[in-house]
Image (tube, rainbow, N blue to C red):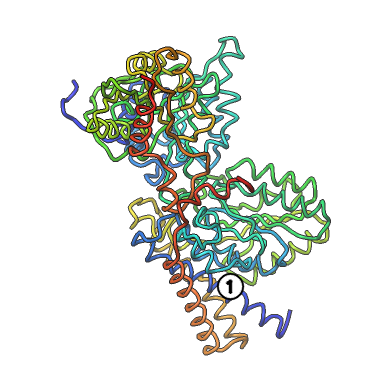
Amino acid sequence: MSSPGRRLGFGLAINEAFHQVMEEDPSVVLIGQGVKSPWYVGNTCNGLVARFGERRVYDTPVSENAVTGAAVGAALAGLRPVVVHPRMDFMLYAFDPIINEAANWRYMSGGAAHVPVVFWGIINRAGEQAAQHSQALHSVFAHVPGLKVVAPSTPRDAKGLMVAAIRDDDPVVFVDERWLYGGEEEVPTEVYGTPIGKAAIRREGTDVTLVAFSYLAPKALEAAAVLAKEGISAEVIDLRTLKPLDAATVVKSVSKTGRAVVCDVGWRTGGIGGEIAAQITEACWAGLKAAPVRVALPDLPAPASRSLEAAYYPGAAQVVAAAREVVARGRG
Amino acid sequence: MEGTDRTTLLLNLYRTMLRIRLVEERFVEPILSGEVKCPVHLYTGQEAVAAGVCAALEDGDYVFGSHRSHGHYLAKGGDLAKMVAEIYCKATGCARGRGGSMHVIAPSAGMMGAAPIVAGTISLAVGAAYAASVRGDGRVSVSFFGDGATGEGVLYESLNLAAVLKLPAIFVCENNLYSTHLPILECRPSEEVYKIAEPFGIAARRVDGNDALAVYEAASSAVSRCRAGQGPVFLEALTYRWRGHVGPDDNIQGAHTDIRSPEEIERWRKRDPIGRLRALLLRDGAAGEAELASLDERIAAEVEAAASAARAADFPATKELADHVFSRP
């Protein structure tokens, strides 16, 4: 039933996930600010209101705390809500229902109740939007027990992880990055879930492992191509899920290469990149030829000015530089 | 109020509104050409609210803004050239290119900042009122926010806090009838925003937000109440934005999210707050055509000079990326 060769971009892949899951499961609802507005949600919500109605696809008032809490409550009452935050920054108003309530509910009820909800946060940064329209908060969510965090980098995974997140019986934070909306790839037409907690090896290599996710995964692939011309063979892992982390795939790769560059799309201090580097160090210590190196955003709020943005966001060049560094200072 | 006081007031209101209008409209072309990149929420059409409220304030009073705050900044006395430079994200801007359009700030003028997190600064304004009450210095604090902010719980928490503490806080809701792309009645059960303050015992009223004098009079009375220690006031100013939610026109910029009819926009353009005040000035004999034309020219020249300076200015230097995170690195 899949039509070979059918290509989709990131946004339309998410859109297809909604169409298919909402069709197969009437308990799935999509609520949040801007579901009727392409300015907020791009093309991810095309056709949903027309097909499923304004009750199941509800463009809400600007009430992040209440709307997110309502999604949690609706999940407790048997729905499978997706609540969208068109800027991840806006989720900060919703920390209580996400962190205090949804994340803890199953455990503090001894498994008597659970919360099948998706918190879909869109990162839409750069464009001189400054500090409150640029923040990537995945590491904060990954810190919290009881939350799963996915951060796809490809259209195929965007669709599959949205499907999997909706079908999951526990709260999942879906990190959506608008910088990924440009690319297209073949996306299966049937409905499918991409396993949560499973990384993908995007390129095999022997000298260094580049661990990345979200927008830095394609940048790591670009970096690997550059490194190859210099005789450095890089293996690229796209984590896809940040929690639960697929440590086994990372450890296996670094055990082979002996070197790791960890790429985080968020701030350096306290970021998931540091956690991954720590796990690599703990698990691979004997085989490490050099300490892992992190690529991350500096510990600064996002600046407005384009001149500062260019210095603020890491890209392929920073990944290349980090890989060269870790290869150069290797101990064997 | 009579005679020269009234003339001075009307001319000040006119000058403030025209400065806001001409600055805002000067951004249209550079936004469309891509020269100005940061998100710009134009205040065109709503000028009477900022002008009327701020004319009732003293220099030491505080205002806090939102995503659409160029008007608040200018009306409160922020430097025009520095604001224009900030919107160009240049090093000479009021936030040194770190904030852009959504974070205009001039603390020395009492413009304490702006933020595009809906309702994000309402509680901050209450905090400044609290500071004034602790010091007993007689200052008042104004929170400007839109009708969209009435969906946020923090507004109600702030109303309660201000009422319980009888703080010198003025809540100014600029009701332009749309929360980005949503008509107000899709977001609230009623168009009458001011009634939300009544259960807190807060004096509340609606005023014609396109009538600068009416806004000024309502704000003056609110300021007097606050300074007399009688607690907070809520003003709903009914108005309309002529431009897009963000940028000159949501529809021509590709978002196609402006669902307002051209007829509706045209209806509101006929209630132009600047045109109305101009007519009043002429009718009162407070100013003649020649005098106003000369004022118009001077303001246009000021705006043009600010735009030229902003275009010529440097972007912040990359080596300064990490400056201003803490007082000391």
Q: Of helix, strand and loop, which one carries label 1?
A: helix
Q: Quadrant of residue A110?
A: top right
Count the marks: 1
Q: Quadrant of the C terminus of chain B?
A: top right
Q: Compared with residue B11, is residue A108 higher up or lower down, i.e. above or below?
A: above
Q: Compared with residue B48, is residue B205 higher up or lower down, i.e. above or below?
A: above
Residue shown at 43% from the left, 48% from the top = A309
Question: What is the three-letter code of the residue carrying label 1?
Answer: Thr
Q: Which residue is mark 1?
A: B16
Q: Chain of mark 1?
A: B
Q: Is residue A21 left or right of residue A231?
A: right
Q: Quadrant of the N terminus of chain B?
A: bottom right
Q: Position of residue A159 (x, y in %)?
A: 32, 27
Residue shown at 27% from the left, 37% from the top = A183
Q: Is residue A119 left or right of residue A39?
A: right
Q: Quadrant of residue A323?
A: top left
